[in-house]
Image (tube, rainbow, N blue to C red):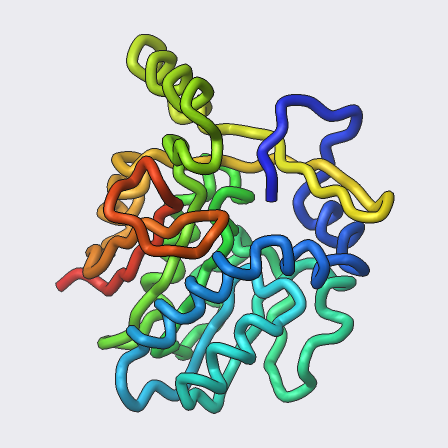
Amino acid sequence: MKPNDSSDEVLDPVAAYDRIAPVFEEISLRREAYLRKIEELVVARVPANSQSLLDVGAGDGRRAIRIAREAGIHKTVLLEPSEKMLRGADARCEIWPIRAEALNGTVGEGRSFDVIICLWNVLGHIRLQDRLSVLRELARLLSQDGVLFVDVNYRYNMGAYGLWRTVGRMVYDRFAPAQSNGDVLVSWELDGMGCTTYGHVFMQREMENLIAGAGLKITGKIFVDYGSGEVRRRGLQGNLFYVLRRRG
């Protein structure tokens, strides 16, 4: 995904993923180093004896299948509203064909998951007014000792956005603070197949407020280079990967 500044047509995220479904695998290969590092970080932190996994914004489902296989998880649920993205999904997976925003107290009632993943800035495709409620629902769906893994694009990731753009964002946020400052357009282009949708890039403080408001606690935070997939020591060099558990 590449934040952009303008587009002739800005699609709803579900419509955008429907459009890029035929080339999604190729698009993913552009970020393979980053995506595989995130998967590696998840698998290394899956609680022992975990039996169930929910992937929120599952795409084509391949990521969830790889993680479940490597972690020895036998029950996998894919939450994905794009019908075209799911056409090739593994038939052994249970499908929830809904938006994350549609989660409520009755969806998955009586169910819980040892592992929930919400990866590759899926949270950034959810509108501001819905982000907290989505995280609260994911907290509800966690088992008592379950873990939620989230990674998001970091607004001040100088390695991805460059020095001057990052400094400009910092100055703007200092003098005109607003959560909407992180709203961006996200564009994909491959072999003539392109589209643009809306997204959001996050500040650490913003994420930590959301996490606390959802009744979750941070048990791990790692900066991951969006290009190389290397773990970085400083936030200015990577995206944000969180390991979260229910509070209390």
* Left or right, 199 with reference to 134: right
Q: Nearer the viewer, residue 162 or 65?
A: 162
Kindly give the residue lying farthest to the top in the view shown: 175
Q: Tell me if residue 227 comes above or below residue 50 in the rendering.
A: above
Rendered image quadrant of residue 222? bottom left
Relative image position of residue 83 (x, y in whole percent): 75, 63
* Total count of labels: 0
Rendered image quadrant of residue 217? bottom left
Residue found 46% across the figure and 20% down from its top: 165
Residue found 58% across the figure and 65% down from its top: 58
Relative image position of residue 188 (x, y in whole percent): 71, 42
Q: Tell me if residue 84 comes above or below residue 75 in the rendering.
A: above
Kindly give the residue lying farthest to the left in the view shown: 248
Looking at the rendering, in which quadrant would you find the N terminus?
top right
Looking at the rendering, in which quadrant would you find the C terminus?
bottom left
* Left or right, 142 with reference to 99: left
Relative image position of residue 135 (x, y in whole percent): 38, 53
Rendered image quadrant of residue 47? bottom left
* Left or right, 25 with reference to 140: right
Residue found 64% across the figure and 60% down from its top: 29
Relative image position of residue 128 (x, y in whole percent): 46, 35
